[in-house]
Image (tube, rainbow, N blue to C red):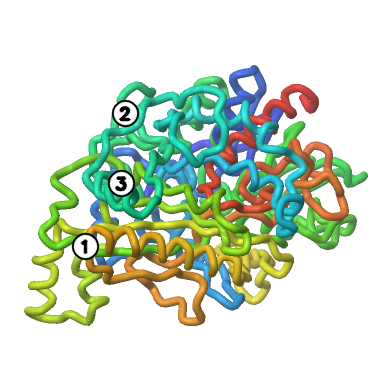
Amino acid sequence: MSDTQSDNTDRTPVDGADVCVVGAGPAGAILSHSLAKRGHDVVILEAGPRFDKEERVDRMKTQLRPEPGDNEIWDMGGERDAYSASGAHSWPVNQRRVKGVGGTSLHWGALVPRLFEKDFEMQSRYGIGRDWPISYDDLRPYYARAEQEIGVTGDEDAPYQPPREEPFPMDPFQKSRPRELFEEAGEALDITVQEMPTAINRGEYDRNACQGYGTCQFVCPSGGKYSADIHVDKAETEGATVIDRVPVQRLEHGPDGEEITEAVYKTPDGETHRQTADVFVAAAGAYETPRLLLLSDSSQYPDGLANSSGTVGKYFMGHPPAGVIGFLPGEETIPGAFGPQVTTAIHQFYDDNPPENGCVNMFPLNTISASPATIAMRQDAIGDELLETVGNQYGSTIGVNMSTEMLPREDNRITLDRSTTDNHGNPVPDVQVEPGDYARKGQETGLEAARSLIEELGGNVVYADGTMTTEHDELTPLGKGGYHPMGGTRMGTDPQESVVDPNLQTHDLENLYISSGGVFVTGGASNPTLTIMALSLKAADHIHETAL
């Protein structure tokens, strides 16, 4: 599968652009739309293709078959997407990202919780991590705007969530049978099961309604799940220009070294072009943005652009996942199509958990992504025993996924691997990650709680493990890590210790902004996309008001 655009697409630079945005994922898309609708000439440079929406059913079929890897669903891999992972643990980058218009939101689960208040104050509250230069209250109006922009379902009365200023744009989905079961067990164990905010349409928003495929991660065939190509389309309606399949090779600056003058990009036919603009926004994600800055070194910036602090690429974080799967004998947990893969949350061990135990966010599942056969094989069943196990277990599966917080550490970082190059001869990113004891303890907290819930229901737990925190890094039914890359271009007020200021403007170059999860100071345990989009709206306001 591939995009259907012909090679004669015009990919020449746009004259007179006000803003050049590198990347058409959630950050670049919502920022571009915010600026374009206010009359600014915006050009978006995207490394990947514009995917054909008509191919999504075929991509779903790829997801459901056991043979292809996750990276194959959205055409990731090969020389274009090469990377290294030289740290203590592998970090399967291409399992969890997409290059193309819409970015990784094309295959996300559309879970959009906010960060909690404590996430912005970890150092001052607990003496660990680092404080953000902004507070939760500073971001609250942008959270509300982002939720309205993308359409979020939720319950404003649910406990264990940060304070809100208004109801969610859409009401919650109906309760699934798995949620009813988890609530039953939670009442007995004093564990609160509540609504998970999701960017999935119940029918009132400007996209198709959810059709209940249950394949939200990695493909939504109906288009009911929000993906950033929606805001790319809106930006184009407002006059923005999108140029796809044009990986930016480097950013060039003027003779005084104070401003970026052009983005150098390659087209599929091998031609090199230079896009000029008044303002540049690097929105290529937490992997590619540090890499782009490091590739853009010069005599004035020998260590890479925006790197006078020496922190570009450093303090990288992610959410090491964990999960529990069980079977409930005689219980029909999935009686027909229901809806989204996840609509339920357990936030109780996020904010109300001793900090030394690690922070974890839990997601009881409506559908299990791992097939019964895969799970049965994990139990060493083969032949007739395998068929019998699958037959007995199908339709009675229940499970919990979870994300755990990783504290920022200087030695967790993105660097350049100069021994390996991509299809344009550039060094690939090298990911060096060690999650640390804090993440391990968070996983242990979540695994214990999830196991107790399933056992309270009389279930048999057949799998309970955390990934990215053991020396073996085995591929599990829930997949490896690589979730939610953050850090590497962190925010701060001190130019000697950070890359961008609270408006996402780089300290070193006045017309260069960075809009991605890379600016996170700490990672929390909440899925980061809503926060990324809220920060992008904040940056767009600053660009509009002061830079143009």
Measure the C-alpha gap from mark 3 to mark 1.
Answer: 14 Å
Query: 222 left or right of 49?
Result: left
Number of dots carrying numbers: 3
Question: Which dot, 3 or 2, sits closer to the camera?
Answer: 3
Q: Which mark is residue 149?
A: none
Q: Position of residue 135 (x, y in %)?
A: 71, 38
Q: Position of residue 235 (x, y in %)?
A: 54, 26
Question: Which dot, 2 or 1, sits closer to the camera?
Answer: 1
Q: Which mark is residue 202?
A: 2
Residue lying at 64% horizontally and 25% vertically, measured from the top left: 35
Residue 271 visible here = no
Label 1 Cα neighbours within 10 Å, binned few <14 / some 14-19 / many ≥20: some
Label 2 Cα neighbours within 10 Å, binned few <14 / some 14-19 / many ≥20: many
Q: Which amino acid is tagged 2?
A: Arg
Label 3 Cα neighbours within 10 Å, binned few <14 / some 14-19 / many ≥20: some
Residue 387 found in image quarter: bottom left
Q: Give the mark, 3 or 2, whose residue is nearer the N terminus.
A: 3
Q: Which mark is residue 183?
A: 3
Q: Which residue was labeled with disc 1?
A: 458
Measure the C-alpha gap from mark 2 to mark 1.
Answer: 33 Å
Secondary structure found at label 3: helix
Q: Which amino acid is tagged 1?
A: Gly
User: Front-most of 115 and 413?
Assistant: 115
